[in-house]
């Protein structure tokens, strides 16, 4: 679990051009499709892209008055349904792509190298993520979905470790549905609360920090079970 605090703060250090609101405004009428592509890439292989905060911001922008993300002839709740479907498919498809990338080129990807990419694809992440899979089994694919960076690495490592694809796709789909729909709907209903709307930067930071909680809680419970099991 020692890698989680390190990885969780990385999205907070990103430049302005990776700010969710900046991205969505910049994409204009193609915002939803552009966000879907970003989610796909982030879930597949490029963990530095925003994930949780981008989903939340999509939901918030759909609920705005007037909305910033619309489809002709649709009211906001209908746009929300369409967005949730598109983003869920993108998240799951990204994981499937990441699984096969890990299966095919994983060892070459995670090798010692200097610079930024050496830090992102550090070989020690393979051992750490293998530990998550060994400790939590299939549940790791659901829990890791809510942790920046880890959701990308766990997919690649599942491919490197030749995890049975049927088991992989089942659990990554469960995580994808809960994550993509849950965070987007949360943004839709909470994004226009004045306290949240007026402090969106702080909220996006909070989302990143809260996203680590499922793994932290699971680790605490696992330790308690281990202690209780000792004679």
Image (spheres, rainbow, N blue to C red):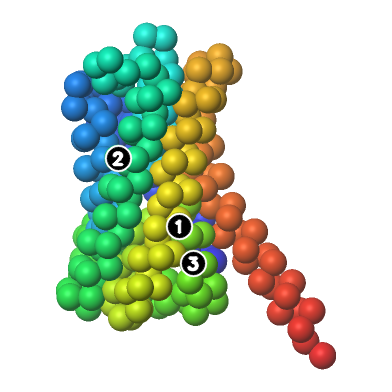
Alpha-carbon span between mark 2 and mark 1: 15 Å
Of marks 3 and 1, which one's residue comes earlier in the chain? Answer: 3
Of marks 2 and 1, which one's residue comes earlier in the chain? Answer: 2
Looking at the picture, how far across and down is residue 157, in whole percent? 34, 72
Q: Residues within 10 Å of mark 1 (few under 14, many from 20)?
A: some
Q: Which residue lies under the disc numbered 1?
A: 174
**Circle 2 SS class:** helix
Single out the mark in the foreground, 3 or 2: 2
Of marks 3 and 2, which one's residue comes earlier in the chain? Answer: 2
* 169 in relation to 22, above or below: below
Q: Residues within 10 Å of mark 2 (few under 14, many from 20)?
A: some
- Asked if residue 12 shows in the view, the reply is no
Single out the mark in the foreground, 3 or 1: 1
Q: Which residue lies under the disc numbered 3?
A: 140
Q: Residue at x 56, y 60 (%)?
A: 215
Q: Is residue 19 left or right of residue 134?
A: left
Looking at the picture, how far across and down is residue 136, in whole percent? 54, 73
Alpha-carbon span between mark 3 and mark 1: 11 Å
Q: Is residue 58 left or right of residue 193?
A: left
Q: Residue at x 47, y 29 (%)?
A: 187
Looking at the picture, how far across and down is residue 68, in whole percent? 32, 17
Quarter where residue 38 is shown: top left
As drawn, the label of residue 86 is 2
Q: Is residue 224 left or right of residue 34?
A: right
Look at the image and tell me in which quarter the C terminus lies: bottom right
């Amino acid at each position: 679990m020692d890698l989680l605090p390190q990885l969780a703060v990385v999205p907070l250090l990103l430049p302005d051009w990776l700010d969710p609101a900046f991205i969505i405004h910049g994409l204009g009428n193609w915002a939803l499709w552009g966000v879907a592509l970003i989610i796909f890439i982030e879930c597949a292989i490029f963990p530095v892209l925003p994930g949780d905060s981008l989903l939340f911001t999509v939901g918030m922008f759909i609920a705005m008055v007037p909305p910033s993300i619309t489809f002709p002839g649709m009211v906001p709740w209908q746009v929300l349904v369409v967005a949730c479907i598109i983003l869920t498919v993108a998240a799951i498809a990204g994981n499937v792509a990441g699984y096969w990338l890990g299966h095919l080129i994983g060892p070459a990807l995670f090798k010692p190298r200097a610079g930024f990419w050496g830090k992102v694809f550090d070989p020690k992440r393979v051992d750490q993520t293998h530990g998550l899979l060994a400790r939590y089994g299939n549940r790791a694919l659901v829990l890791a979905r809510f942790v920046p960076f880890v959701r990308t690495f766990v997919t690649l490592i599942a491919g490197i470790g030749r995890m049975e694809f049927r088991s992989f796709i089942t659990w990554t789909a469960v995580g994808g549905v809960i994550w993509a729909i849950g965070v987007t709907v949360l943004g839709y209903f909470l994004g226009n609360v004045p306290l949240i709307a007026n402090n969106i930067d702080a909220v996006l930071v909070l989302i990143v920090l809260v996203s680590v909680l499922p793994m932290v809680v699971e680790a605490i419970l696992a330790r308690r079970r281990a202690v209780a099991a000792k004679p």
